[in-house]
Image: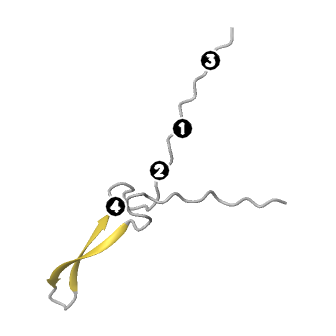
Amino acid sequence: MAQHSPAPLRLCPDCNGFPVVAIDAGTLLDYGTRGTLLVACRLCRGTGSARTATPAPVVQREHA
């Protein structure tokens, strides 16, 4: 039997599949660690994959 493979995932063109990054804020917190900010990609909203094109609406026609 043929085996189906899932469709390849389309990576986001802005983040290239790395949707969330931690940026060092440069401050040292009271318990000794650095303060970081987690920033998500604005295009894919943190998913890492690009949306596929939305399908065209289906138009139903009446047959005469």
Residue 2, disc: none
Query: In the displayed structure, would residue 6 be above or below residue 54?
Result: below
Q: How many labels does the image show?
A: 4
For the point 53% across and 33% down, the residue is 56
Of residue 12 and residue 32, the one placed in the foreground of this image is 12
Q: Earlier in the sequence, mark 1 or mark 4?
A: 4
Amino acid type at mark 1: Pro
Relative to residue 5, is residue 35 drawn left or right? Answer: left
Real-space CA distance between mark 1 and mark 3, rounded to the nearest whole angstrom: 18 Å
For the point 57% across and 24% down, the residue is 59
Q: Name the residue under label 3.
A: 61
Q: Which of marks 3 and 4 is nearer the N terminus?
A: 4
Q: Position of residue 21 (x, y in %)?
A: 33, 71
Q: Name the residue under label 1.
A: 55
Q: Mark 1 and 3 residues: CB-CB less than 8 Å, in contact?
A: no
Amino acid type at mark 2: Arg
For the point 16% across and 81% down, the residue is 26
Q: Where is residue 53 in the image (x, y as percent from the top left)?
A: 50, 43
Q: Name the residue under label 4.
A: 41
Badge 3 element? loop
Q: Mark 2 points at which residue?
A: 51
Q: Earlier in the sequence, mark 3 or mark 2?
A: 2
Relative to residue 57, is residue 61 drawn left or right? Answer: right
Q: Residues within 10 Å of mark 2 (few under 14, many from 20)?
A: few
Real-space CA distance between mark 3 and mark 2, rounded to the nearest whole angstrom: 29 Å
Q: Which of marks 4 and 2 is nearer the N terminus?
A: 4
Amino acid type at mark 4: Cys
Of residue 41 and residue 14, the one placed in the foreground of this image is 14
Residue extending furthest bottom?
A: 32
Real-space CA distance between mark 3 and mark 4, rounded to the nearest whole angstrom: 42 Å
